[in-house]
Image: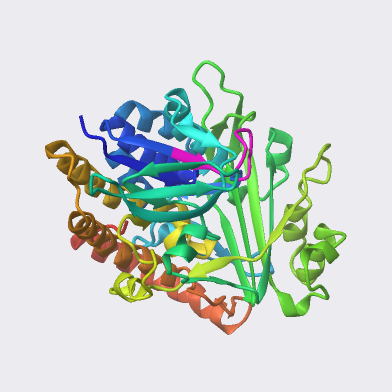
């Protein structure tokens, strides 16, 4: 039996998914999560597309995948949707779901998905909470085997053969490794809100939201609004809501809404979040010239009791490291750049949320990473002297060679490290509207004749 052990720092979506892949293949591992077990910090919506599906296929059993599929949002009868672009007058410019080349996705609450993924991990006792990552060090045992020791903020430590940093966009693993490729986008503030969606509240929202998310770009401001409408259980079909043409059934007790407003910091009279007394008022002021529908959408939770505070934050995004970044980092003579430390998801390629690909690409990483870990575990079964430094280095290079082009392509498509300055209210919006009406039918015909490979 191999003594190969993987230490995963971070119990979010990527860390939990990878842990399932290791568990299902008999590889020893332990997940360390800084938050407490009952934390709902990841409670916003994620939209699942081809990338996450690749990760699921690699790491999960069919039954596990089916449990996730049962929780996907079913907007107007369709799971996979795409946003519609609107101007500030609440006029639809283009429905991206009608664009054949646009990657479509299905919504799910992040807490729901995380809990489904962590179920087997909790049951097997292979996750520990309240364990913030402090640092790692590479050392050689008396046997001559190289190992990695990981220290935590509570003074404890663990030893393994390989460390996987899945600790998000503020990754301490990234910094110690010498990557330092994640940039704070301090030119804008992001105001994020979520809440429950009983039927009366859902009916007060624009019907278009039942078909898919709405996005607005106005100068340097962007707005995103989405509903999570999980399907009703067959034995308990809570509600059937007519969306003009298509009947819509959803589970009211699990449904939710999510919206985000990104505003330039230079138009706000604040230097830090603590100075903002009324978050909702700031949002209304930022969109004061927008159509009444948008103000009603922002106000949706005014009748809630026990309302949780709106999250106000600044986003982060990554730049792509050079192919030889590890060699350059190793020249410092420390443990920087060491191939026994890998990073996944936002810890490597944090991206803006406007394409909904951050979580998708994090889980797609697991499909690239897991085969390399299984290979190293296979080598460890051959002899206790394996895997060697060179063997680990080769596997690490294979993972990064597969992951980087895919993930950083989406970083760039999501805006890179700058925010889009797009105004759909004027000439550009008019052009996009008419081009979409003319080009989409022709593009659909072309892709019917010459199908394209889907992006992950």
Q: Position of residue 193 (x, y in %)?
A: 70, 51
Colouring used for the render: rainbow
Q: Nearer the viewer, residue 290 or 228?
A: 228
Vertical order, 433 against 50 (above or below): below
Vertical order, 38 against 15 (above or below): above
Q: Where is residue 276, by image quadrant? A: bottom right
Residue 238 left/right relative to 432: right
Q: Position of residue 437 (x, y in %)?
A: 44, 69
Q: Residue at x 15, y 43 (%)?
A: 379
Q: Residue furthest left?
A: 382
Is residue 344 visible to us here?
Answer: no
For the N terminus, which image quadrant?
top left
Residue 32 left/right relative to 299: left
Q: Main secondary structure of the magenta part?
A: loop
Q: Position of residue 403 (x, y in %)?
A: 30, 60
Residue 126 left/right relative to 199: left
Q: Residue furthest top?
A: 235
Residue 217 left/right relative to 397: right
Q: Residue furthest front?
A: 142
For the C terminus, which image quadrant?
bottom left
Vertical order, 391 against 329 (above or below): above
Q: Nearer the viewer, residue 327 or 304?
A: 327
Q: Residue at x 82, y 68 (%)?
A: 285
Q: Residue furthest right?
A: 277
Magenta extent: 31-41
Residue 208: within the magenta?
A: no
Q: Residue at x 20, y 48 (%)?
A: 387
Q: Residue at x 48, y 34 (%)?
A: 127
Q: Nearer the viewer, residue 258 or 130?
A: 130
């Amino acid at each position: 039996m191999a003594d190969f052990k993987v230490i995963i720092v971070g119990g979010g979506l990527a860390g939990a998914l990878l842990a399932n892949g290791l568990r299902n293949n008999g590889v020893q591992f332990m997940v360390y999560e800084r938050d407490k077990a009952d934390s709902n910090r990841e409670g916003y919506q994620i939209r699942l597309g081809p990338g996450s599906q690749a990760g699921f296929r690699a790491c999960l059993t069919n039954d596990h995948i089916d449990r996730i599929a049962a929780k996907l949002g079913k907007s107007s009868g369709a799971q996979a949707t795409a946003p519609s672009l609107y101007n500030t007058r609440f006029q639809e410019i283009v429905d991206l779901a009608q664009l054949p080349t646009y990657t479509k996705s299905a919504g799910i609450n992040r807490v729901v998905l995380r809990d489904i993924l962590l179920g087997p991990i909790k049951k097997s006792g292979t996750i520990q909470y309240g364990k913030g990552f402090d640092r790692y060090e590479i050392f050689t045992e008396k046997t001559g085997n190289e190992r990695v020791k990981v220290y935590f903020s509570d003074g404890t430590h663990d030893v393994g053969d390989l460390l996987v940093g899945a600790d998000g966009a503020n990754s301490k693993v990234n910094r110690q490794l010498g990557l330092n490729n994640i940039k704070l986008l301090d030119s804008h503030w992001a105001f994020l809100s979520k809440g429950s969606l009983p039927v009366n509240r859902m009916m007060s929202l624009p019907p278009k939201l039942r078909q898919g998310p709405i996005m607005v770009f106005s100068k340097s401001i962007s707005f995103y609004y989405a509903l999570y409408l999980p399907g009703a259980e067959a034995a308990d079909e809570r509600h059937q809501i007519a969306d003009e043409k298509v009947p819509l059934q959803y589970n009211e007790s699990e449904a939710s809404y999510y919206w985000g407003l990104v505003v330039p910091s230079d138009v706000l009279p604040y230097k830090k979040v603590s100075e903002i007394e009324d978050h909702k008022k700031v949002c209304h002021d930022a969109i004061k010239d927008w159509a009444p529908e948008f103000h009603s959408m922002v106000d949706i939770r005014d009748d809630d009791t026990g309302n949780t505070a709106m999250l106000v934050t600044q986003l982060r995004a990554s730049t792509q490291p050079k192919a030889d970044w590890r060699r350059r980092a190793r020249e410092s003579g420390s443990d920087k750049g060491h191939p026994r430390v890998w990073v996944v998801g936002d810890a490597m390629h944090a991206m803006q949320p406007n394409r909904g690909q951050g979580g998708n690409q994090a889980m797609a990483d697991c499909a690239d990473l897991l085969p390399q870990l299984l290979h190293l575990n296979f080598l460890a079964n051959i002899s206790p002297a394996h895997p060697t430094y060179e063997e680990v280095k080769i596997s690490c290079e294979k993972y990064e060679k597969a992951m980087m082009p895919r993930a950083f392509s989406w970083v760039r498509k999501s805006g890179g490290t700058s925010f889009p300055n797009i105004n759909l209210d004027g000439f550009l919006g008019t052009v996009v509207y008419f081009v979409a009406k003319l080009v989409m039918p022709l593009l659909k015909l072309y892709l019917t004749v010459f199908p394209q490979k889907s992006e992950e």
